[in-house]
């Protein structure tokens, strides 16, 4: 029985390697490197955007099941200063490391890799702002957007920002987590920029969200209530949004309810 099981596993691995090609590569995006992880397939590529403080590894538990069903190219990457991606060594102005530059770097990387045409966007949490900015610049290239408990651009009011988001003071406190330093340093500016950008209405958006607290602790009751209210109203404001509630899940829905996320992405790909 053990030999039989081993043979099945071996066939499974060989079958996967025959139909896909994994690429873990560094792409020069302007004198410094951005890391991309790609499972190559055939069809409209799917780009995964991680949340704040996360790198591409956050998606690893759902990638193969999605590839198995779609056989399409799956792209994950590390934003500058996260994972194995570098920061621009020639830039000294903290404000230049914000979301505008981040999406510019992504565009350069995707173009060099040949994935700058039609695409499906998937994002978690803070990554939803990256999806929105990218989609607003390339609305005719986007076939679908799947938001996974993502930050909706209207969520952060000036009042919330003043109460819950203070600028980091010392770079040295972040050591090897400089990507997080720049994210937090520029977050208020990012939130204000993104409030001015509208969601395109020429492609479908699926908004998967959990009703559990996004930030734990009774002191964050107001921010959690606003998070839920923003998601509940999102579909009423934007006509092309379909809402899915991830019952029993926390903020990291792809870990808590992986089948829900996998099935949603596969169905979106099939119906693109």
Image (spheres, rainbow, N blue to C red):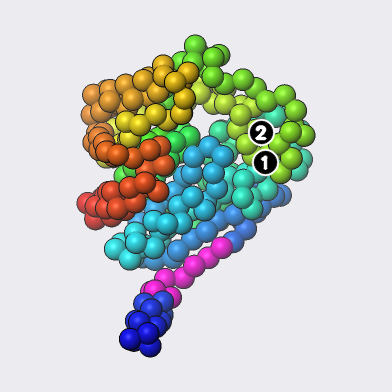
Q: Nearer the viewer, residue 74 or 253?
A: 253
Q: Which residues are magenta?
A: 16-24
Q: Nearer the viewer, residue 123 or 202?
A: 123
Mark 1, secondary structure of its residue: loop
Q: Which residue matches tag 2? A: 181
Disc number placed over residue 177 in the picture, else none:
1
The residue that appears at 34% across and 59% down in the rendered structure is 66
Q: Quadrant of the N terminus?
A: bottom left
Q: Say whether residue 17 is magenta.
A: yes
Q: Nearer the viewer, residue 3 or 150?
A: 3
Q: Is residue 143 visible?
A: no
Going by the image, does 193 lie left or right of 101? left
Q: Are marks 2 and 1 in contact (CB under 8 Å)?
A: yes
Q: Position of residue 75 (x, y in %)?
A: 46, 55
38 above or below 13? Answer: above
Q: Is residue 3 visible?
A: yes
Q: Nearer the viewer, residue 170 or 88?
A: 170
């Amino acid at each position: 029985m053990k030999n039989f099981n081993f043979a099945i596993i071996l066939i499974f691995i060989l079958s996967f390697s025959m139909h896909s090609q994994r690429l873990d590569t560094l792409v020069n995006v302007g004198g410094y490197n951005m890391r991309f992880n790609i499972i190559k397939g055939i069809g409209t590529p799917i780009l995964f955007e991680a949340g704040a403080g996360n790198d591409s590894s956050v998606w690893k538990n759902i990638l193969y099941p999605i590839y198995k069903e779609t056989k399409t190219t799956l792209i994950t990457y590390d934003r500058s200063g996260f994972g194995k991606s570098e920061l621009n060594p020639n830039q000294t102005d903290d404000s230049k490391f914000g979301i505008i530059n981040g999406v510019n770097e992504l565009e350069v990387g995707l173009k060099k890799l040949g994935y700058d045409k039609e695409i499906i966007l998937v994002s978690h949490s803070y990554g939803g702002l990256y999806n929105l900015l990218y989609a607003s610049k390339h609305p005719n290239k986007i076939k679908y957007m799947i938001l996974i408990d993502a930050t909706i651009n209207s969520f952060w009011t000036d009042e919330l920002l003043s109460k819950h988001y203070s600028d980091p003071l010392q770079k040295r406190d972040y050591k090897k987590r400089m990507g997080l330093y720049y994210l937090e340093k520029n977050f208020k500016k990012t939130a204000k920029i993104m409030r001015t950008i509208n969601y395109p209405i020429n492609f479908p958006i699926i908004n998967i969200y959990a009703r559990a607290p996004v930030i734990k602790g009774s002191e964050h009751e107001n921010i959690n209530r606003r998070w839920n209210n923003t998601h509940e109203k999102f579909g009423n404001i934007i006509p092309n949004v379909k809402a899915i509630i991830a019952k029993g899940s926390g903020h990291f829905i792809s870990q808590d309810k992986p089948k829900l996320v996998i099935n949603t992405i596969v169905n979106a790909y099939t119906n693109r």
